[in-house]
Amino acid sequence: MSYYLGLDLSTQQLKCTLIDESHAIVWENGIHFDNDLPEFNTKHGAIVNGDVVTSPTLMWVKAMDLLMVKLKDSGYTKDIKGISGAGQQHGSVYWSKEGLSHLEHLNSAQTLEEQLKDAFSIPQSPIWQDSSTTAECRALENLVGGPKALADLTGSKAYERFTGNQIAKIYHHNKQGYEDTVRIHLVSSFVASLLLGKSAPVDAAEGSGTNMMNVVTHKWDEKLLLQCGGETLKDKLGHEPVEGGASLGKINAYYVERFGFHPDCAIMPFTGDNSATLVSMNLSQGDCVVSLGTSDTVLVYLKEGTAEATTESHLMAHPTDATGFMGMLCYKNGSLAREHIRDTYSDKNWDTFNKHLEEQEAMLKGDFGYYYWMQEIIPFAKGIYRFDHKTPVNEFSVPSENSKAIVESQFMSMRIRLARMTNSPVKRILASGGAAANSKLLQVLSNVLGLPVYKQHGMNGASLGGALLAKFGVYKDTCFEDMMSAHPSAELELVSEPDTERVEKYNECVDEFVELEKSIVKE
């Protein structure tokens, strides 16, 4: 029997999914950073210092050690033919010269953590939640003629979390750390590099999340590289982006000797977590993925000629279609913001929260809430704002309404931006991410967007997408669509259908929602 492994180094855990030739999931496992690696002192996988948000790079290395032991104990490693996967988008890793040398000379008698403990010139990796690079963003946009010009070139206007702006901050404010860096990886290419025992390139979909890659040619843009990191940045990146499905080489002997992998096990380019989620859902025209996780994301597959960059959405290279695109909306305030409201208004209990979702009214009786608990991206705003029939209020008359209001607000924003991003009619929502386990939440999503909501079996969409990319790379002479159609996955489960009466009422709230949001952003 042959198997394909997908890894996902997300914000809060390192997950894996193993599939067989027919794409059935045969094994899943993970390492939760806060619970399994408490010595790194993270909360929700991160270390927050105001607008600066990082994760300890060595924590990710140790998580790989622990997960590999679990894989070895499973007995599957010798039959794994290929490995790919995903990393949280935008995060970056900074290798020293000595560290890269250690990576290239791994000793199977030692753990990765023991060998790479001093490998990183900057030990704390900036991650996607960081919002400390506004000055660098404005400078990059000014270089090319403004936000829309940068979006036309790279697929997105400048965003604080995007890797190029994070690199620019280090280049300008941590010159010694930058000079000591010989290689910069994204989280995705970092994991691939650990498996190869040498530096791996990013895939084009990941390059789209840097503000440094031309979204049409899939090549680094020289003037953007110069702005973000000076004349040495191209060398520090090491490689031009590659297309999904290309083989990067065989797994390093370290994993063969220590964990029992077959020496011919192939390593494919890793992609971003959102791209991998899109792969796992195998979208048809008219499908839209809503991934409800630490961040909330909306993903649509846009064929060549149907995509146009905007300044509030992202246009990214597609992970399996070299001429196609992935349209994306990304919200910082996802599950953590919902949990904050749950803890404040619903007794720290999801059952109570869900009861409030069912029994309370908020938007449909004129109570609108906007919950930018963390610095939000869409729109660029921070703070919690409430309105009672358009009048700002400090709190609703029934405080437990907040649990309903935050969910309605998050989903209404998705509805409005999705309509702006594509003229193609959306026919159904495919829900993924941890919060997709909550059927009450999905019913609100269905009502606000006016669409049926489906869900896949198995909740780790990004690691499943990685496993499918691994197989795609092994069978690289077959197009991805043909590979998927040969082994159709289990039918999607219909979990929510829209309540027609409520849909009509939400339709009437759209203009007021937009108007109130504009008033917040102006402040």
Image (cartoon, grey):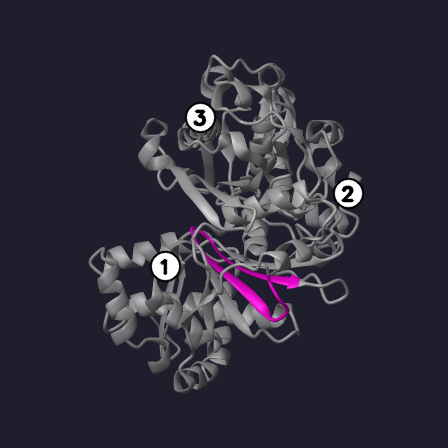
Q: Name the residue at 79% across, 48% down.
A: 217
In the image, residue 73 sits, relative to residue 326, either above or below, namely above
Report helix, strand or loop for mark 1. helix
Secondary structure of the magenta portion, mostly?
A: strand
Mark earlier in primary sequence (2, 3)? 3
> On the picture, is 358 further left or further right than 2?
left
State which region is magenta. Answer: 283-301
Q: CA distance from mark 1 to mark 3?
A: 29 Å
In the image, residue 237 sits, relative to residue 17, either above or below, namely above
Q: CA distance from mark 2 to mark 3?
A: 33 Å
Q: Dot 3: few (<14), some (14–19), or many (≥20) neighbours within 10 Å?
A: some
Which residue matches tag 1? 437
Instruction: Tell me the amino acid under the disc marked 3.
Output: Asp
Which residue matches tag 3? 65
Which residue matches tag 2? 219
Instruction: Tell me the amino acid under the disc marked 2.
Output: Lys
What x and y, as percent, mark residue 236?
69, 27
Q: Is 241 or 81 nearer to us in this picture?
A: 81
Mark earlier in primary sequence (1, 3)? 3
Q: Is residue 202 magenta?
A: no
Mark earlier in primary sequence (2, 1)? 2
Q: Name the residue at 33% across, 26% down.
A: 39
Furthest residue in direction front, as rendered: 1
Q: Name the residue at 75% across, 62% down.
A: 304
Mark in front: 2 vs 3: 3
Is there a contact, CB below 8 Å, between mark 1 and mark 3?
no
What x and y, as percent, mark residue 100?
61, 19
